[in-house]
Image: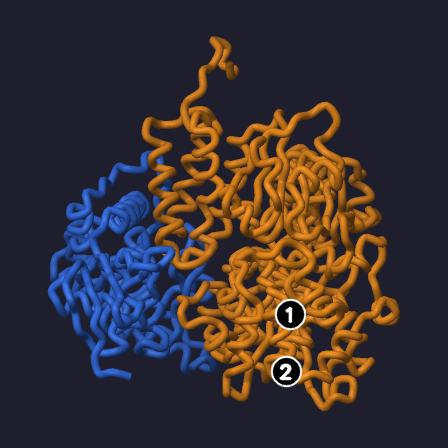
């Protein structure tokens, strides 16, 4: 095996180490390929398909976040075929999910000429905000199903496995065991899922309350009483035999 | 809610628990049989026993259509809603069933004792309109009385088999299951004996020489697949039989398993010996409950006779098969999604590469073949690759099974050599169009296929001829439509099928199948919006070109083919002043 592979990306000769993905090889010469689900510290699942590129000889478009480079490969990252797929994916996403707090995706939409209203009468994925714990809220109307939260909760980081997928197809959602509130799951409130969420579907509770127009003092007292309630609950659970009121 | 007695579950968990996560689907099936559905404490007990995170258990239950997390009626009737059955009146059947449930509801009853659900294609297309009563297949539901249906008196359907040859279907269509003795009398397991006396390399060479390609739809050369796995130095390898048949219009696996289960086992055992695997899985779709039981009995017979297990037929070769049931997910017919399902996960397809030949089931080198592919193996060994190549065309050697359904006189399974014309299959074998009707179109390859029209009647049924005609062979499924059929309605059903069956992993398919279905709904209701055809094309191209797996890549195939043939179907139609269609 050679130390370096030579390929062509958008007409530019590129050299990179074996095992490099097309996405990284392109970035090394300043060619930016758009991504949504990709995250440097998460397992790549090639599921948003925004990073697809044309590779000579391939039957379909190729996801650059996982496809490895090979010697002599001819890659085109911005052909009409590629742009049509990216634009359509963005247009479908904009009619499915609330992207109001996803500036990166909005920027892609402008770049690819994707219109929010391309699919009239389209069903949106709407669900109520889940506010079941003092640390963060879950607003799945904003969820693009990038899978990052599920992965950092599992083998990508925390090994807590509090959340997984529910439903399937268009109805897919992120959820807990039998939709239980997070405090009743294995969640340890590490906050890693909130950190990797690209669309603010997961948001720190404090930030959310501030946006709701609550004052910092109110928020302090709100979360304090939640903490107290929780401590009382735990104390009661430890002394079931005393018959104390909970 | 009645008290849940977890003690009932203990024997199941004691048995399956040590297997860990891979036993998740079997455990959930067993739990559902005990409790009627999967209550929360039961799901939790299963997760703890198998050491599967509870959120994952819930994710799996929620993925598969045949698992219920809420109480359900004692009897569930699944009515097929896909083209062949809908053309035969499935919607009317569904309506009557719903009325009957209503009529038989007792006052004050909280839970109906019977519930009716629309199901995706049940693989009973030659018996349309078909349904399942608590898993038991019922043919021609429009002719059955309600009392017979709910009392289980309705007779099960028997396969309709014909064709020019019967090399693969010799034991099929006789109205009974071929047991081990009968199979042996018909020369069964002779090929296995022959194979065990050969070197594995020689068997792989023979399969390659025969030019056999996969019959599940992808047409990958079988010998090349086997060779890659045989060459691997990994000590653990697997062979898997894909019997997750669910493409609308397809019922060939069902017929073969139902009538001649040992032929499938023989093919899989030879495959295992050729590639050096000691464990095999046979994954059958959840809706095929009857066929699951037939296979279970056949496997037991084979073990008893020393054809499975240790030292098979005194050859020194050890191999056994584990039978697995799906639970209602078309996507699990995709090979990597099927592996995930066996591993106890949601049926999400994996990214390829790596391919199953290097990283398959449990990450090990794996051969996965369709039922029809495997039953060609005993034949190849019996007659030899040279004679096998005399069948069919030069580029498409061998026999082929075609599932013919829809508006023909005799819907059924037909075995022909590759290269006969579509007209021969339809007119000479299936008896032509129903009396008084004309051919309008035929859907080749199922929901993931494309339409053939009048000019295609003389196309020869071979890979090369169909490719030239722009038609897919797919898994060998052809649904015929006469001049009375509303193609917008047919497309709507196909759109519904994909929207229902998309796994939801990759964006193009997750959202594209839904958007496609919405637009097809508008079109079927004759209220298309300007630009809907272009929307369908953009969605279609994006799914075809950018989806992660074969489901998404073919989810727009029939629609795009219809746009090519009948662009006018996608424009608003003139309506009469009374509101009817002109």
A40 to A239, vertically: above or below: above
A128 on left or right of B163? left
Most distant residue in the top direction? B577
Residue at screen point 12% across, 67% down: A29
Give the residue at mark 1: B282
| Residue A130 in view here | no
Residue drawn at (59%, 70%), measured in percent from left and top? B208
Look at 50% across and 87% down and name the residue there.
Answer: B233
Query: Which chain is drawn using blue?
Result: A
Instruction: State which mark lies toward you, 1 or 2.
Output: 2
Label number found at residue B155 = none
Image height of B578 relative to B333, above or below? above
For the residue pair B351 and B266, the one nearer the viewer reads as: B266
**Quarter of the image that includes the N terminus of chain B:** bottom right
Mark number displayed over residue B200: 2
Q: State how many labels appear.
A: 2
Callout 2: chain? B
Residue A134's spot in the image, x, y percent? 27, 66
Indicate the position of residue A218 as horizontal and vertical percent values.
15, 60
Which chain does tag 1 point to?
B
Q: Is residue A47 visible?
A: yes
Whole-number angstrom distance, CA of label 1 to CA of label 2: 21 Å
Camera-side residue of A82 and B499 = A82
Q: What colour denotes chain B? A: orange
Q: In this view, does B188 lie to the left or right of A225?
A: right
* Other residues around mark 1 within 10 Å, as few (<14) / some (14–19) / many (≥20): many
Q: Position of residue A207 (x, y in %)?
A: 17, 60
């Amino acid at each position: 095996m050679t130390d370096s592979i030579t390929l062509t990306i958008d007409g530019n000769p590129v050299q990179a180490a074996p095992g490099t993905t097309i996405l990284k090889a392109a970035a090394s010469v300043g060619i930016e390929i758009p991504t949504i689900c990709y995250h440097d510290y998460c397992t790549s699942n090639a599921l948003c398909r925004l990073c697809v590129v044309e590779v000579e000889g391939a039957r379909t478009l190729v996801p650059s976040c996982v496809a490895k480079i090979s010697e002599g490969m001819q890659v085109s990252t911005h052909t009409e075929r590629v742009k049509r797929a990216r634009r359509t994916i963005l247009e479908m996403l904009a009619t499915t999910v609330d992207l109001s707090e996803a500036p990166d995706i909005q920027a892609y939409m402008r770049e690819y000429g994707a219109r929010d209203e391309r699919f009239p009468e389209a069903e949106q994925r709407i669900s109520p905000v889940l506010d079941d714990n003092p640390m963060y809220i879950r607003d799945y109307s904003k969820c693009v199903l990038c899978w990052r939260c599920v992965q950092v909760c599992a083998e990508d980081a925390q090994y807590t496995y509090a959340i997984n997928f529910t439903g399937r197809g268009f109805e897919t959602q992120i959820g807990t065991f039998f939709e239980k509130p997070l405090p009743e799951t294995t969640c340890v409130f590490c906050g890693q899922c909130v950190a990797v969420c690209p669309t603010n579907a997961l948001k720190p509770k404090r930030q959310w309350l501030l946006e709701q127009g609550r004052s910092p003092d109110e928020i302090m007292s709100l979360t304090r009483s939640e903490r107290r309630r929780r401590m009382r609950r735990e104390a009661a659970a430890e002394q079931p035999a005393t018959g104390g009121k909970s | 809610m009645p008290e849940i007695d977890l003690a009932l579950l203990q024997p199941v968990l004691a048995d399956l628990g040590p297997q860990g996560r891979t036993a998740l689907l079997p455990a959930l099936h067993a739990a559902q049989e005990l409790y009627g559905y999967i209550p929360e404490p039961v799901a939790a007990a299963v997760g703890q026993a198998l050491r599967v995170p509870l959120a994952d258990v819930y994710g799996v239950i929620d993925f598969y259509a045949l698992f219920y997390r809420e109480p359900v009626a004692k009897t569930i009737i699944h009515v097929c809603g896909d083209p062949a059955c809908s053309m035969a009146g499935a919607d009317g059947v569904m309506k009557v069933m719903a009325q009957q449930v209503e009529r038989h509801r007792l006052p004050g009853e909280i839970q109906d004792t019977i519930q009716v659900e629309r199901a995706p294609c049940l693989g009973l297309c030659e018996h349309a309109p078909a349904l399942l009563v608590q898993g038991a297949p019922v043919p021609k539901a429009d002719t059955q009385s309600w009392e017979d249906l709910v009392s289980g008196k309705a007779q099960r359907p028997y396969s309709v088999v014909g064709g020019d040859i019967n090399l693969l279907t010799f034991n099929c269509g006789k109205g009974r299951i071929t047991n081990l003795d009968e199979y042996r009398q018909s020369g069964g397991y002779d090929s296995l004996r022959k194979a065990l006396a050969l070197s594995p390399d020689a068997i792989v060479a023979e399969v390659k020489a025969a030019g056999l390609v996969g019959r599940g739809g992808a047409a990958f050369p079988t010998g090349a697949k086997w060779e890659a796995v045989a060459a691997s130095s990994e000590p653990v390898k697997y062979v898997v039989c894909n019997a997750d048949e669910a493409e609308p219009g397809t019922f060939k696996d069902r017929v073969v398993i139902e009538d001649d289960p040992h032929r499938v086992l023989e093919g899989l055992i030879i495959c295992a010996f050729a590639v050096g695997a000691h464990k095999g899985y046979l994954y059958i779709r959840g809706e095929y409950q009857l066929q699951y039981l037939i296979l279970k009995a056949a496997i037991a017979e084979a073990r008893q006779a020393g054809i499975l297990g240790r030292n098979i037929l005194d050859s020194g070769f050890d191999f056994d098969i584990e039978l697995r049931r799906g639970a209602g997910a078309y996507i699990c017919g995709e090979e990597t999604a099927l592996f995930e399902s066996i591993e106890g996960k949601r049926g999400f397809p994996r990214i390829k590469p790596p391919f199953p030949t290097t990283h398959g089931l449990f990450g090990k080198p794996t051969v996965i073949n369709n039922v029809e592919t495997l039953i060609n193996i005993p034949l190849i060994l019996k007659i030899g690759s040279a004679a096998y190549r005399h069948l069919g065309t030069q580029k498409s050697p061998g026999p082929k099974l075609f599932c013919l359904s829809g508006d023909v006189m005799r819907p059924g399974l037909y075995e022909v050599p590759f290269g006969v014309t579509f007209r021969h299959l339809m007119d000479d074998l299936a008896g032509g169009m129903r009396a008084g009707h004309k051919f309008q179109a035929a859907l080749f390859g199922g929901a993931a296929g494309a339409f053939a029209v009048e000019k295609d009647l003389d196309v020869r049924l071979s890979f090369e001829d169909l490719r030239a005609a722009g038609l897919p062979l797919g898994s060998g499924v052809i649904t015929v439509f006469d001049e009375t059929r509303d193609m917008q309605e047919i497309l709507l059903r196909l759109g519904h099928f994909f929207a229902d069956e998309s796994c939801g992993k990759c964006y193009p398919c997750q959202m594209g199948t839904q958007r496609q279905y919405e637009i097809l709904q508008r079109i079927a209701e004759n209220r298309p919006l300007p630009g809907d055809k272009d929307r369908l094309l953009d969605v279609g191209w994006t799914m075809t070109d950018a989806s992660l797996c074969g489901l998404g890549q073919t989810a727009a195939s029939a629609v795009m083919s219809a746009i090519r043939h009948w662009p006018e179907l996608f424009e608003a139609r003139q309506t009469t002043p009374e509101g009817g269609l002109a």
